[in-house]
Image (tube, rainbow, N blue to C red):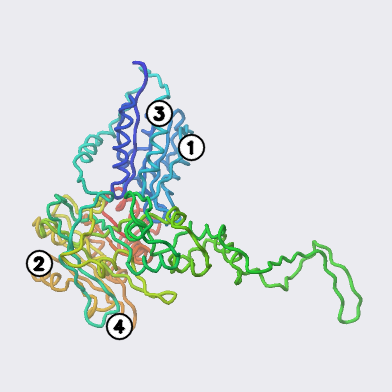
């Protein structure tokens, strides 16, 4: 590039757990070497109207929840959608990180790509979709897009301001933070040992919830309350054995994996997800199954009607309405028809894969796959993230979790959650090495001012981060009041951390403790009911600036709690439904950032 050329490149990242930020920093290093002058920008609060000032933009973003923007990108997305600034003259490309096991795969990145295109920006390279093992796809993208961006000639004009705007002022902080990150990651986990793994439930409980403690040893790993711990699990030995037997493979065969060459048995144990079949495998059945018999298609050519009353007969034309007397086509025993139904009906696909693994499907359709074919289709084994249930200040050198162990039986076999059963059944306390790493949060954090009051809603295992919050608030010694809402099925069997909670109450650290035991009375009571019962006081806390936190099930509980907050704003804040919704969803959640969620 000549001296009068604009060499600037802005890399925006949207992240929930830090992966997109890491890739943004790696992309910057490559871009700088190509002669570009690169700035990495956190999307958080970036104004839409400033985007036009950048002539080269790369977006690297993850997707959160059900196709949603990650927390730090949500406000910028809303701003761009509201203002729709012209991006004519802007050159861009998007790298999207996702998980193919979700329907809304890479949706946030796809949305950014479509939006920039809609606003008139020039797409330099197609959006790159990256699965959980994102680095190979990212590398393909970055090797294409950086040379393409560097080849674009943009002449500097004196009438234009410098492309680095005030909103970029946080970038140096991001660079420093990235350079100081731990060497331990999902790809290079620290090999820890579990020192405690005991059941929290009382006798007679239908649940199995465990308190699990990991020793951080000499790792140097640190964490703050609100962070998550990544745990790298392995597949159950029994499932590995049965899969090899069902498929007729040679367990000693050497195969290539992301961890290098290893035996097929080791690869199935440690490198691939085999506890649940994926959609790619079901789709591949189209090439494997054969019809078990004749398939008949019926087509109406013409209709002839005879009167039973002796009034003659007539011919009915093809345009006349016809009430069909034939049942609609449904999949029967023919395997080709069944596969066609599964691959063409998203709901049928979801219902089928929900309770099955590869062993079930191989038996169901009597199909054979070579080991190489199977490994090409199977998903790479993914770490699981768990909300941390401890303060590092209270438990130096250790990290603690509250984990619900998932067990169930389907199709004649006992099964369970991959990582939860691994920790409960396969790991031997103080013996087995377990890979772990920290997944820092940018949003689910305590208020910086320790005099600020907080309300915490964490039923079931959702209590995990709030145990950590309480330990940290006690350690910090602030004057802010703490109000905890907790609940589960029964006080007798699911009152987790009862002694600690009672101690916090006795010592004045926990200002109020409100419970919702759903099965201890005829009418089921949940935390959202308790919130509405205490609506007037909750509104008083909101008016004094209290923070509101929720952790747990996003499908039902989080939505019910969210609606309860809107009802509280209406009833006790005197707001209309529209104003109450705006206050909860915009003012508290996005502008003031004092309504924070860790839902899954």
Where is residue 456? Give x, y as percent.
Answer: 23, 63
Circle 1 is placed at which residue position? 117
SS of the residue under disc 4: loop
- First reached walking from the N terminus: tag 2 or tag 1: 1
Q: Circle 2 — which element?
A: loop
From the viewer's perspective, tell me whether residue 221 is left or right of residue 2. left
For residue 126, say whether it is visible.
yes
| Label whose residue precedes the other's in the sequence (3 or 1) | 1
Q: Are marks 2 and 4 in contact (CB under 8 Å)?
A: no
Residue with the mark numbered 4: 521
Residue lying furthest top in this view? 3
Residue 147 tag number: 3
The residue carrying pointer 4 sits among few (fewer than 14), some (14 to 19) or many (20 or more) residues within 10 Å by Cα, namely few
Image quarter (top left, top right, bottom left or bottom right) of the C terminus: bottom left
Judge from the rendering whether residue 374 lies leftward or rightward of residue 592; answer left or right: right
Q: Position of residue 451 (x, y in %)?
A: 13, 54
């Amino acid at each position: 590039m000549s001296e009068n050329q604009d060499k600037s490149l802005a890399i925006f990242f949207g992240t929930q757990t830090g992966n997109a930020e890491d890739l943004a920093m790696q992309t910057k290093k490559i871009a700088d070497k190509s002669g570009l002058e690169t700035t990495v920008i956190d999307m958080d609060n970036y104004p839409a109207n400033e985007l036009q000032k950048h002539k080269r933009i790369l977006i690297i973003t993850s997707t959160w929840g059900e196709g949603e923007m990650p927390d730090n990108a949500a406000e910028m997305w809303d701003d761009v959608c509201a203002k729709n600034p012209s991006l004519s003259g802007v050159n861009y490309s998007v790298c999207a990180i996702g998980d193919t096991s979700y329907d809304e795969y890479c949706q946030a990145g796809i949305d950014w790509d479509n939006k920039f295109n809609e606003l008139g920006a020039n797409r330099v390279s197609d959006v790159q979709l990256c699965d959980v093992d994102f680095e190979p796809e990212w590398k393909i993208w970055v090797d294409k897009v950086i040379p393409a961006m560097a080849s674009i000639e943009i002449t500097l004009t004196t009438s234009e301001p410098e492309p680095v705007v005030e909103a970029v002022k946080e970038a140096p902080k991001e660079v420093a933070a990235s350079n100081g990150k731990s060497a331990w990651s999902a790809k290079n986990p620290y090999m820890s040992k579990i020192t405690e793994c005991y059941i929290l439930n009382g006798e007679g409980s239908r649940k199995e919830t465990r308190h699990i403690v990991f020793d951080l040893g000499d790792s140097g790993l640190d964490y703050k309350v609100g962070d998550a711990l990544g745990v790298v699990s392995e597949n159950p030995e029994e499932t590995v054995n049965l899969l090899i037997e069902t498929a007729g493979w040679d367990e000693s065969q050497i195969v290539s994996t992301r961890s290098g060459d290893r035996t097929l048995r080791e690869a199935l144990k440690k490198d691939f997800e085999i506890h649940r079949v994926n959609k790619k495998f079901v789709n591949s059945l189209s090439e494997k199954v054969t019809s078990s018999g004749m398939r008949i298609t019926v087509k109406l050519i013409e209709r002839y009607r005879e009167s039973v009353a002796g009034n003659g007969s007539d011919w009915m034309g093809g345009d006349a309405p016809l009430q069909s007397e034939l049942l609609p086509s449904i999949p029967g025993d023919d395997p080709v028809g069944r596969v066609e139904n599964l691959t063409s009906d998203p709901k049928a696909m979801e219902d089928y894969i929900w309770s099955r693994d590869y062993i079930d499907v191989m038996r169901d359709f009597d199909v054979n796959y070579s080991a190489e074919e199977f490994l090409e289709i199977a998903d790479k084994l993914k770490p699981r993230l768990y909300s941390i249930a401890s303060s590092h200040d209270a438990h130096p050198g250790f990290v603690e979790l509250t984990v619900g162990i998932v067990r169930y039986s389907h199709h004649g076999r006992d099964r369970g959650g991959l990582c939860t059963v691994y920790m409960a059944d396969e790991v031997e306390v103080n013996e087995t090495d377990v890979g772990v790493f920290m997944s820092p949060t940018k949003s689910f954090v305590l208020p910086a001012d320790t005099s600020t009051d907080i309300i915490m809603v964490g039923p079931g295992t959702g209590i995990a981060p709030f145990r950590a919050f309480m330990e940290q608030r006690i350690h910090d010694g602030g004057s802010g009041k703490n109000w905890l809402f907790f609940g589960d099925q029964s006080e007798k069997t699911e009152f987790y951390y009862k002694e600690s909670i009672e101690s916090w109450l006795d010592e004045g650290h926990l200002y109020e403790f409100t419970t919702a035991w759903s099965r201890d009375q005829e009418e089921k009571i949940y935390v959202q009911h308790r919130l509405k019962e205490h609506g007037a006081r909750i509104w008083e806390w909101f008016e004094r600036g209290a923070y509101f936190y929720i952790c747990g099930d996003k499908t039902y509980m989080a939505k019910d709690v969210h609606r309860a907050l809107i009802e509280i704003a209406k009833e006790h804040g005197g707001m209309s439904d529209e104003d109450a919704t705006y206050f909860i969803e915009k003012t508290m959640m996005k502008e003031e950032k004092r309504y924070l969620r860790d839902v899954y």
